[in-house]
Structure formats: structure tokens, C-alpha cells
Amino acid sequence: MKARAEAIVAKQGLDHRELNGPWRDRDVEFSVQLLQLVHGGRDPALRLRATLPCLDEMADAGYVAAEDAAALAIATGSSAPSSTPAAVEEAQVHTVPG
């Protein structure tokens, strides 16, 4: 899905980094949640709410390479999920280039 979205953005002549940046919190959260859906049914250790602890569990279990897990954790900046401000203020937190 991410590749499809990037293709649409490229077709419109936009740079995807103008919208969200190359690996933002939402991308990492989406990837972790997708892997939870795929593997969490058989692996109860992946049934966590927090993204970074779940990412650690995935690396420990071999679902994600340790180097990739570390890079994804760094990409999040270990900050609060990016959707929190939008949920609190009920507004978009980024702007689309005009």
C-alpha cells in the first residue's frame, strides 16, 4: 500500500517527503501493526499496544532483523505516536503542498 501511495504522489509531481518524511511514526506503526496481524495470532508476545516494545519482541523472535528494528526505532525518535496531536486537537498535523 505504501508503494501505491508513493506512486500516486510521484504521478502528481510531489515528493513524498513533503507530506510525511521518509520513515515517520505512522509508517513504523503501520508496519508493526501489519506484522502483529500476520504473526500475533500464533505469537502472544506480539500482542502489545506500544509500538517500540512490540518491535523489540519482533526482533527477538526473528520476525524483523535486529538492525532493521533499531533503524525503525531511531526513525520514530522514540516520541509519542504522531496521531496523538491529531486525536487531541481533532485537526491535521501536517500540510499538503499546494
Image: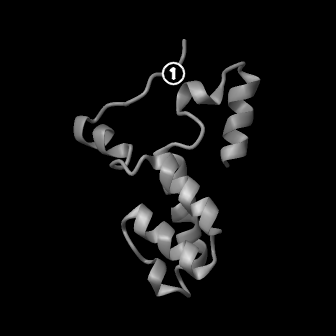
Q: Residue at x 35, y 48 (%)?
A: 79
Question: Does 5 sit left or right of 35 as displayed?
Answer: right
SS for callout 1: loop
Q: Quadrant of residue 54?
A: bottom left
Q: Residue at x 62, y 62 (%)?
A: 67
Question: Does 30 sit left or right of 15 as displayed?
Answer: left
Q: Compared to 86, does 51 lie above or below?
A: below
Question: Does 10 sit left or right of 96 as displayed?
Answer: right
Q: Position of residue 33 (x, y in %)?
A: 51, 64
- Return the residue at label 1: 96
Q: Quadrant of residue 61?
A: bottom right
Q: Compared to 54, does 74 lie above or below?
A: above
Residue sticking out furthest to the top: 98
Q: Compared to 75, does 46 lie above or below?
A: below
Residue flagged by tag 1: what amino acid is it? Val
Q: Residues within 10 Å of mark 1 (few under 14, many from 20)?
A: few
Q: Which quadrant does the C terminus fall into?
A: top right
Question: Does 51 sit left or right of 12 as displayed?
Answer: left
Q: Quadrant of residue 59?
A: bottom right
Q: Residue at x 67, y 49 (%)?
A: 1
Q: Position of residue 46 (x, y in %)?
A: 48, 78
Q: Position of residue 85 (x, y in %)?
A: 29, 39
Q: Compared to 53, does 13 lie above or below?
A: above
Q: Residue at x 62, y 60 (%)?
A: 68
Count the numbered circles shown. Answer: 1
Q: Position of residue 22 (x, y in %)?
A: 60, 38
How is the structure coloured here? one colour
